[in-house]
Image (tube, rainbow, N blue to C red):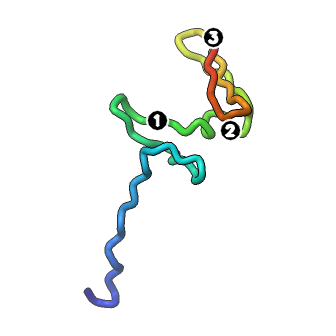
């Protein structure tokens, strides 16, 4: 390799384990499609309303870090 060529990049894939110490990946792929990080949905709020098939659902984060989805 000559000095003008950049070194080959190493691809680092996010871990699938539940690691609370680091930041979670923004998107991950599952067998059914893509997953969205809950922080993107909540955007710093404790709860958010989600419209689905004409109904309003509420996604809420608890103090213990759990999620509750109610209709």
Residue visible at 66% across and 35% down in the picture: 65
Quick check: 6 above or below 56? Answer: below
Q: Name the residue under label 1.
A: 35
Q: Where is residue 68 in the image (x, y as percent from the top left)?
A: 63, 22
Q: Where is residue 55 in the image (x, y as percent from the top left)?
A: 60, 10
Q: Separation of disc 1 and disc 3 at Cα? A: 21 Å
Quick check: 59 above or below 65? Answer: above
Q: Which of marks 2 and 1 is nearer the N terminus?
A: 1
Count how many numbered circles sit on residues in the image: 3
Q: Position of residue 18 (x, y in %)?
A: 50, 43
Quick check: 5 above or below 51? Answer: below
Residue visible at 73% across and 33% down in the picture: 63
Q: Earlier in the sequence, mark 1 or mark 3?
A: 1
49 sits to left or right of 11: right
Q: Residue furthest left?
A: 1
Q: Separation of disc 2 and disc 1 at Cα? A: 16 Å
Residue 61: image tag: none
Residue visible at 61% across and 34% down in the picture: 41
Q: Where is residue 57 in the image (x, y as percent from the top left)?
A: 63, 16
Quick check: 4 above or below 24? Answer: below
Specify the quadrant that holds the N terminus.
bottom left
Residue 16: quadrant of the picture = top left
10 sits to left or right of 64: left
Q: Mark 2 points at which residue?
A: 43
35 sits to left or right of 23: left
Q: Earlier in the sequence, mark 2 or mark 3?
A: 2
Camera-near label (2 vs 3) is 3
Label 2 SS: loop
Residue 46: quadrant of the picture = top right
Residue visible at 33% across and 90% down in the picture: 3
Q: Name the residue under label 3.
A: 71
């Amino acid at each position: 390799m000559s000095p003008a060529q950049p070194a080959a990049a190493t691809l680092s894939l996010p871990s699938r384990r539940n690691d609370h110490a680091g930041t979670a990946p923004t998107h991950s792929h599952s067998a059914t499609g893509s997953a969205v990080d809950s922080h993107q949905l909540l955007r710093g709020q404790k709860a958010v309303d989600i419209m689905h098939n004409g109904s309003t659902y509420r996604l809420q984060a608890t103090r213990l870090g759990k999620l509750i989805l109610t209709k």
